[in-house]
Image: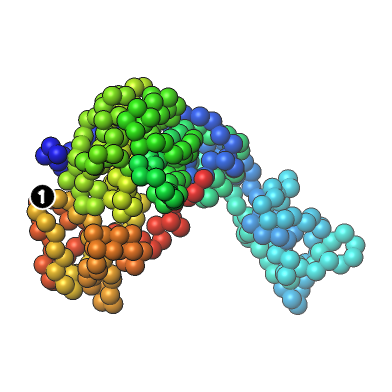
Amino acid sequence: MPAPYSVDAAIAWVDAAARSLDREYLPLRAAPGRVLTESIHASGPIPLSDRATRDGFAVQASASFGASAYNPVRLPLITVGAGEALPAGTDAVVPLELAEFDGQACIEAVEAVAAGDNVEQQGAIATIGAMLVPAGTRLAARHIGLLTIAGLTRVPVVRRPRVRILVTKPAKAGAWEDSNGPMICSAVRRDGGMIGECVAVERDEMAIRAALVEADADIVLVIGGTGLGSDDHSTAALGGAGELAIHPVALRPGETTSLGHTVGRGPAILLPGAPAACLWSYELFAGRAIRRLGGRGPELPYRSCEMITARKIVSALGMTEICPVRCSAGGTVEPVPSFAETGLMAAVGADGFVIVPEGSEGHPQGARATVYLYEGAESTAEFQ
């Protein structure tokens, strides 16, 4: 096997190969989680007119002067609901609990109000031309609410990346159950990708090459067949169908990751077949590519924090290593059995992970380390 490429070199290749896709217009209800391609400005004042902030009675404030429980002031009955525009000639709202209906189309206010009380003024949210949401924003519920208030019904967003997944079958006959496909499909959805197809292909160079050539997608992921075994044909297939640009990568787990282009010049990423290696090859490279294609930030979708190592975290020089860790009280972190020892259980049983770069042998006890935490990662990512 040739000398591996550094993880930094592989990431640089991904960033050059995966550029934000073109735009499409979507109804607001379908836009959460998508990335705006243009800044949205207010076409008029928001709100368009003065409006009530609570249920009550619209009044001319000056007419309520002197009202009290001992001296109720009689006013015209003009009901108004929260969010409704104030009728002409009124400038305040008397809350329901501070007035009583007298049975004769009037109310008796027991407390005076000042002009503007319980009222949201015209333009209080935004004036004409004000920036509402800048380009590049990933739309969340709060943005959808504001844009709805502004009167928009459709917005321009980056198109969702179409992802084709090819899962190579083991060459040996017998029962086979694919665990990598469901795992990677879940991660693709988390990262905003749209799975066009997830299919099994024979672990044969010509079969994989044919599947790569016919791929109609923004990015193709091939799972398995990236190693040095006699039935590992994915890298040769990519070289024959397009371009094999990077292979292997100095990543543990994930050494046999490969990167390249299909015949149509879309990025193709070959993920190792071992589940732990498949996961981390996806997270560092394929997931980054999908996020970039969809206009999202390329960074890992995990919250990170600085913690102190309770025990030494060991890594081999020359390899970027993903080290599973467990967090303890007091802001300390310690290593747990590695992916080489326990496979995916190292991720499921850990609180997070530390990425040790290839030029380091790890972190000594008492050192500060950046820890990426699993908790909350799925909930903060919007599935579509």
Choose between 80 and 222: the one closer to the eye.
222
SS category of the residue bearing label 1: loop
- Compared across the picture, whether 211 is left or right of 55 comes to left
Residue at x 36%, y 31% (from the top left corner): 208
Residue at x 46%, y 29% (from the top left corner): 23
How many neighbours does mark 1 have within 10 angstroms: few (below 14), some (14-19), or many (20 or more)? some
Query: What residue occupies the far front of the structure in this picture?
Result: 173
Residue at x 76%, y 73% (from the top left corner): 71
Location of residue 158 in the rendering, given as x and y in whole percent from the top left corner: 45, 33
Location of residue 38 in the rendering, given as x and y in whole percent from the top left corner: 44, 32
Location of residue 361 in the rendering, given as x and y in whole percent from the top left corner: 10, 58
Please tell me in which quadrant of the rendered image residue 80 appears.
bottom right
| Residue 204 against residue 78 in the figure, above or below | above
Query: What residue occupies the far top of the structure in this picture?
Result: 264
In the picture, which quadrant includes the N terminus? Answer: top left
Residue type highlighted by circle 1: Gly
Pointer 1 residue: 318
- Compared across the picture, whether 135 is left or right of 116 comes to left
Location of residue 318 in the rendering, given as x and y in whole percent from the top left corner: 10, 49
Choose between 217 and 54: the one closer to the eye.
217
Q: Is residue 174 visible?
A: yes
Choose between 289 and 368: the one closer to the eye.
289
Please tell me in which quadrant of the rendered image residue 170 appears.
top left
| Residue 301 against residue 220 in the figure, above or below | below
Q: Is residue 143 visible?
A: no
Query: What residue occupies the far right of the structure in this picture?
Result: 104
Choose between 164 and 225: the one closer to the eye.
225
- Compared across the picture, whether 76 is left or right of 301 comes to right
